[in-house]
């Protein structure tokens, strides 16, 4: 049965959640492998809106097991809140349905406090983080000071290590002008979280190995997007994990030779939140129109997203970095009503023409996008049920994208609901 990784090809918010939701109907397992509650999926099911931050969107399908892999950083407070909210809405979130890696690292209150204190300091370059403690938690994981979720179920070990770690964190917090945190305020609460989460914890790598050998179909759901990758993104304006498809393996303990397809999600235009260069950004009425019409406000922080034309140079680079074998185009309906559309097909940097995203911020901030223009379309796409019914100009826009990228489009999303989806190739037959 197929194994498929889904990744964003831009700066996140490409609409991965909806595509995952549509594909999950046929998947036995949906796995998150990196990031934390900095991510946010907005799903519309039967006109009802759900926002998820940590739990894979497969939770809405009765026969899908959702996995939070070892590469994810978990804020237990947020996760438990999400579980309880879903339960209140009548969704099954039992330990049979949700499996969490005991190796996943825990976002602690001092991670959030440090993230926010660092961002708040004046005269320093802000990254524009979500303030959820993601970066500081990954720092501690790599620095070997972190707490795995399983550690919360071992009171003596947790107590001793927390005392030592907290000493250093309070030193940092006070020097950053923030309040120190008390041991008592954290210890009892996190031991309780450990008890709550214990039935959900397991070795998810073993689970996936068995599932694979039992011929299950497995979908790995990336969070954020390629250009927020810690290595290949617009560093330092990136998140703190590898968001590219390769991390589906280390973030879940699954071997690379067992991955069959990589689906790249491409929003029909480009957006980003936070700071950093953005070559095709439209700081004008068009940018505002895309933001309003596309509802481009962060599902985690509510921040307005910066908007611009579709940058095919980025997407082409993402195809190379992720080994993308197929594409899903999302939010195509948002472009309806624009007289002319632009696609960025190269960058001009001084007297050089680039067809890839350069490594340094200086270079990316200096590039001049080279555009190809196409006529737009008037029609509302949300009612369309088959590819053939799309306006000819829409087909031309899609064909141009496919020809340039040389990767087939498998899915076209024409509106927010599950129903607004044209599937050209079934990835989970
Ligand atoms: P952090 O991941 O909270 O440390 O934030 C680092 C950068 O990644 C900031 O620019 C965030 O806005 C951005 N970011 C993190 N998660 C997402 C996401 O899910 N969508 C879009 N941007 C994100």
Image (cartoon, helix red, strand yellow):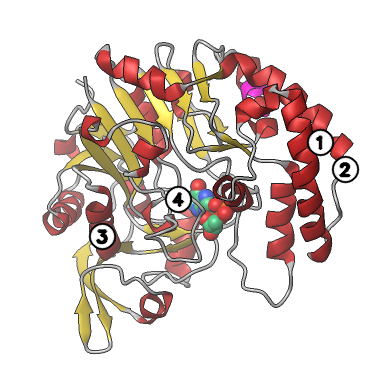
Q: CA distance from mark 2 to mark 3?
A: 46 Å
Q: Which residue is mark 2?
A: 182
Q: Earlier in the sequence, mark 3 or mark 1?
A: 1
- Which secondary structure, mark 4? loop
Q: Which mark is residue 317?
A: 3
- Which secondary structure, mark 3? helix
On-image quarter of the C terminus: top left
Q: CA distance from mark 2 to mark 4?
A: 43 Å
Q: CA distance from mark 3 to mark 1?
A: 43 Å
Mark in the foreground, 3 or 4: 3
Horizontal and vertical percent position of residue 107: 65, 40
- Circles 2, 1 touching at the beta carbon (< 8 Å): yes
Q: Which mark is residue 294?
A: 4
Horizontal and vertical percent position of residue 343: 25, 65
Q: Residues within 10 Å of mark 3 (few under 14, many from 20)?
A: many
Q: Earlier in the sequence, mark 3 or mark 4?
A: 4
Horizontal and vertical percent position of residue 290: 44, 58
Q: Residues within 10 Å of mark 1 (few under 14, many from 20)?
A: some
Q: Tell me which corner region of the image, top left, top right, bottom left or bottom right, holds residue 177.
A: bottom right
Q: CA distance from mark 1 to mark 4?
A: 40 Å
- Circles 2, 3 touching at the beta carbon (< 8 Å): no
Q: Which residue is mark 1?
A: 186
């Amino acid at each position: 049965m197929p194994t498929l990784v889904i990744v964003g090809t831009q700066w996140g918010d490409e609409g991965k959640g909806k595509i995952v939701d549509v594909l999950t109907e046929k998947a036995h397992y949906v796995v998150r492998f990196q990031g934390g509650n900095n991510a946010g999926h907005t799903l519309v099911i039967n006109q009802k809106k759900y926002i998820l931050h940590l739990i894979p969107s497969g939770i809405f399908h009765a026969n899908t097991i959702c996995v939070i892999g070892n590469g994810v950083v978990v804020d237990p407070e947020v996760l438990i809140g999400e579980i309880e909210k879903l339960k209140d809405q009548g969704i099954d979130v039992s330990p049979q349905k949700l499996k969490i890696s005991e190796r996943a690292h825990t976002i602690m209150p001092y991670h959030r406090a440090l993230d926010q204190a660092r961002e708040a300091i004046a005269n320093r370059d802000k990254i524009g983080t979500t303030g959820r403690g993601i970066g500081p938690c990954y720092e501690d994981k790599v620095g070997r000071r972190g707490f795995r979720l399983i550690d919360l179920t071992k009171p003596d070990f947790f107590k001793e290590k927390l005392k030592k770690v907290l000493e250093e964190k309070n030193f940092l917090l006070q020097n950053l002008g923030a309040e120190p945190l008390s041991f008592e305020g954290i210890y009892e609460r996190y031991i309780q979280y450990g008890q709550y989460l214990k039935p959900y914890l397991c070795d998810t790598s073993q689970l996936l190995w068995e599932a694979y050998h039992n011929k299950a179909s497995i979908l790995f759901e990336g969070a954020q997007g390629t250009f927020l990758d810690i290595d290949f993104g617009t560093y330092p304006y990136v998140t703190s994990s590898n968001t590219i498809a390769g991390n589906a393996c280390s973030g879940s303990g699954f071997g690379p030779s067992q991955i069959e397809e990589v689906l790249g999600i491409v929003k029909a235009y480009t957006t980003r939140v936070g700071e950093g260069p953005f070559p095709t950004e439209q700081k004008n009425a068009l940018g505002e129109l895309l933001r309003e019409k596309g509802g481009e406000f962060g599902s985690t922080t509510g921040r307005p997203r910066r908007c611009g034309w579709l940058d095919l140079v980025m997407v082409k680079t993402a195809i190379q970095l992720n080994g993308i074998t197929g594409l899903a185009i999302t939010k195509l309906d948002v472009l309806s009503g624009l007289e002319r559309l632009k696609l960025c097909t190269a960058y001009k940097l001084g007297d050089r023409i680039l067809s890839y995203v350069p490594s340094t911020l200086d270079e990316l901030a200096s590039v001049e996008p080279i555009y190809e223009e196409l006529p737009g379309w008037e029609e509302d796409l949300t009612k369309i049920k088959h590819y053939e019914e799309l306006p000819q100009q829409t087909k031309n826009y899609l064909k141009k994208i496919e020809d340039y990228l040389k990767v087939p489009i498998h899915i076209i999303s024409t509106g927010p609901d599950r129903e607004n989806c044209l599937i050209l190739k079934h990835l989970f037959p």
